[in-house]
Image: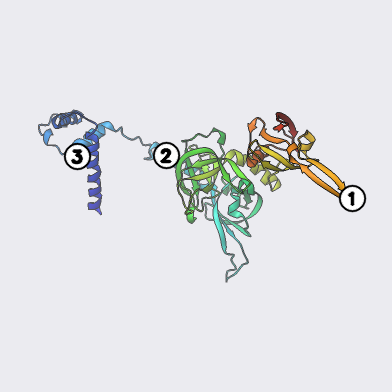
Amino acid sequence: MKTAALCTLSAVIAAGTVMLFQQLPGLTDAAQAQQFRRRATPAQAVSADAEDAPTQQILQDALSDMTPPRVYNAAGLAPDEAVASFVYEANDRSVVNIATRIGAARGLLGENPTADSGSGFVLDHRGHILTNNHVIESAQRILVTMHTGEEFEAELVGREPINDLAVVRISAPPEKLVPVRFADSSALQVGMRVFAIGNPFGLERSMTTGIISSLDRTLPVTRARSIKSVIQIDAAINPGNSGGPLMNSHGEVIGINTAIASRTGQNSGIGFAIPSNLVARIVPELIQHGRFIRPEFGIDEVAKTDEGLRIITMNPEGPAAKAGLRGPEIRRSRRGIFTFESRDISTADIIVGVNGKKTLKPDEFLSEVESHRPGDRITIEVLRGGEQVSVPVLLE
């Protein structure tokens, strides 16, 4: 073992020697030796045997001048290590393991088979815990294991499948519940360091680090719906990490780890997290109402065209119709005792934007509308008779 280690080290040093000498082009061997002697310590500089000093020692002396010493704190940690340690200590007690069970109880112990497992984190002292909807979906029992090792059975409070969020609640003593702190995800930048804590492969409260690789990604949920403003990270995310928190260097939660892009189902360096600002908008309603209340707009179906989204069906009593948006023209005709109805979609408005934002996809349009609350007024830009018209709509 030691021999192998020494061989590896020698190879590294030899490679370093070549690389270092390449940094001094145009010098003869004697001139290079003179350069190294100038960088040596005073005792070595006055030694008559400096010419015979081992090459490795000369290289070490040169590198010690070139590389500034690393700074450590009182605990013996470098600055980057201290940050990682701080983030972990600040959130370790907030992260929980979530196991779900489905099917009828069976066996001597009457246990349900495990269906899935994932992560979650504490929101408040009342026992509310946030996780992904896909972690607890279809579960008949939800078991939460805290940092103390204690296991609690949780009840489902509310869930939002379209944005893959769910809140459960456990009856744990308040003093054992350590809520996380949230940060504003709109302030994130590509390149910022991130930290993920979760339970990959059942390894409880494991932390990985990385950076934000990109922002404003779109994560498909169904054929027609997707999650917007998703954070792309390169921190290792594996099965079991779903529902765990993503933190910044201040230990604040900036997202919830949700998915990976992988052909094997394991980490590939591309992970996705739902941003904290979306969480902050949805979770209070899940706790209060058990569901996310979307504003009523009154358009039931649109068709994608090269110009925008043509209105196909709409509620004649809905907000859009009340505001003056136009759907297909309905034409009725009678032939004897029969009444025939036809629709002329060429007369329908074509939606091209919401509140000044261009929108050509159904999910973009829905996401923009649903980012508002009932009672908000939005402006819909439409093409009508070849001209663009702005129509204010009061959401209900």
The disc label shown at residue 82, or none: 2
Task: Please name whichever residue, 102 or 94, is drawn nearer the observer in this view of the structure.
Answer: 102
**Sequence-earlier tag: 2 or 3:** 3
Residue beneath the point at 48% across and 39% down: 212
- Foreground label between 3 and 1: 1
Query: For mark 2, does the 10 Å Cα neighbourhood hold few (<14), some (14 to 19), or many (20 or more) residues?
Result: some
Q: Quadrant of the N terminus?
A: bottom left
Q: Position of residue 388 (x, y in %)?
A: 70, 29
Q: Secondary structure at mark 1?
A: loop
Q: Which residue is mark 1?
A: 336
Give the residue number, with chain letter if any, for mark 3. 56
The front one of 116 and 337 is 337
Specify the quadrant of the image occupied by residue 50: top left
Going by the numbered disc 1, the residue's amino acid type is Gly
Front: mark 2 or 3: 3
Quadrant for residue 112, please give it: bottom right
The answer to whether the residue labelled 1 contacts the one labelled 2, judged by CB atoms less than 8 Å apart, is no
